[in-house]
Image: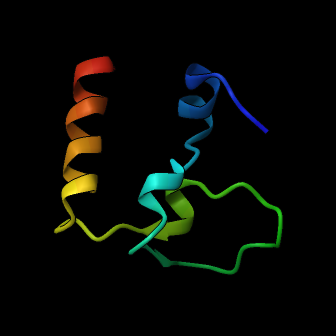
Amino acid sequence: LIHRVSSAREAGMLPLGLAPGSVLRKPVARGQTLTYDDVELDESLTIVHLRRLQDLETG
């Protein structure tokens, strides 16, 4: 399922590129969309840093 950026951002959906290296904070049902609230990101990863910069630039 593909979402518009605006709706994905509003829902706090986790971009797939950030999933590797993240750790689940709580159980997530199979098929459920992952959100930023569901995971703890590894802030030392370059991809996480780049995403933070992108979010700052695009609002």
The residue under the point 22% across, 44% down is: 50
Q: How many marks?
A: 0
Q: Is residue 2 left or right of residue 53?
A: right
Name the residue located 83 percent from the left edge and 63 percent from the top edge: 31
Q: Indicate whether 27 appears above or below 7.
A: below
Whole-percent x, y for residue 1 in the image: 79, 39
Left or right: 7 in relation to 54 = right
Task: Name the image quarter holding residue 57.
Answer: top left
Please say which color scheme the image uses.
Answer: rainbow
Q: Position of residue 21 (x, y in %)?
A: 38, 75
Identify which residue, 8 or 20, lies in the foreground.
20
- Give the quarter of the figure containing the C terminus: top left
What residue sits 19% from the left and 50% below the top?
A: 49
x, y percentage for residue 14?
Answer: 53, 51
Q: Quadrant of residue 58?
A: top left
Residue 29, image quadrant:
bottom right
Q: Is residue 40 left or right of residue 1?
A: left
Position in image of residue 12 (x %, y %): 55, 42
Q: Is residue 30 above or below residue 11?
A: below
